[in-house]
Amino acid sequence: DFDKIIAVILNLVKNAVESFTLEESDVSKNGKYVKIKTELVDDFVLIYVSNNGIGISEPEKIFNEGFTTKSNGSGLGLWICRKYMQEQQGELNLSRSTDDYTEFSIQIGVGG
């Protein structure tokens, strides 16, 4: 479902941009980025969404229903995104999160 894949990517980009506003020491946001990279590997498309905002403090919880670190968050965004990908026999994973770099990966089968 193309719409659900786009919704997942948009949610990851939105979260990345919001991570920039959480950094008190970086008022100007100069040098901040969100990157989207795609790759075809065998029968899979890999989509990477990365940013250099602050890292994720509790990575083991981010896909749990209702978990949020935002004061106005519902804790449903990443949970729904992972569910969307699973419904399409795909995967959504946190590949890496450090103090200065975070990357999510989406894996979707192609062909049939």
Image (cartoon, helix red, strand yellow):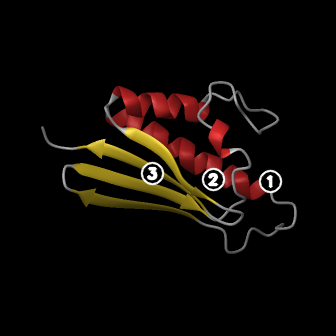
Who's the residue at 20% across and 44% down the image? Answer: 110
Residue, x 69% and y 51% (percent of image)? 56
Q: Which is more foreground, mark 2 or mark 3? A: 3
In the image as oriented, which residue stretches furthest toward the bottom?
A: 31
Q: Where is residue 94 in the image (x, y as percent from the top left)?
A: 54, 49
Q: How far apart are marks 2 and 3 (CA)?
A: 14 Å
Residue 16 numbered mark, or none: 2
Q: Residue at x 49, y 45 (%)?
A: 93
Q: Distance between the residues labelled 2 and 1?
A: 10 Å
In the picture of the structure, the residue carrying the numbered disc 3 is 105
Callout 3 crowding tier (Cα within 10 Å): few <14, some 14–19, many ≥20: many
Lower sequence index among marks 2 and 3? 2
Q: How far apart are marks 3 and 1 (CA)?
A: 23 Å
- Which of pointers 3 and 1 lies earlier in the amino acid sequence? 1
Hey, what amino acid is under mark 3?
Ser
Label placed on residue 22: 1
Q: Where's residue 106, x and y in %?
A: 41, 47
Position above or below: 64 against 38 = above
Secondary structure of the residue carrying numbered label 1? loop
Q: Pinpoint residue 77: horizontal percent, then vertical percent.
A: 59, 33
Q: What residue type is labelled 1?
A: Leu
Q: Do the residues labelled 2 and 1 touch (CB within 8 Å)?
A: no
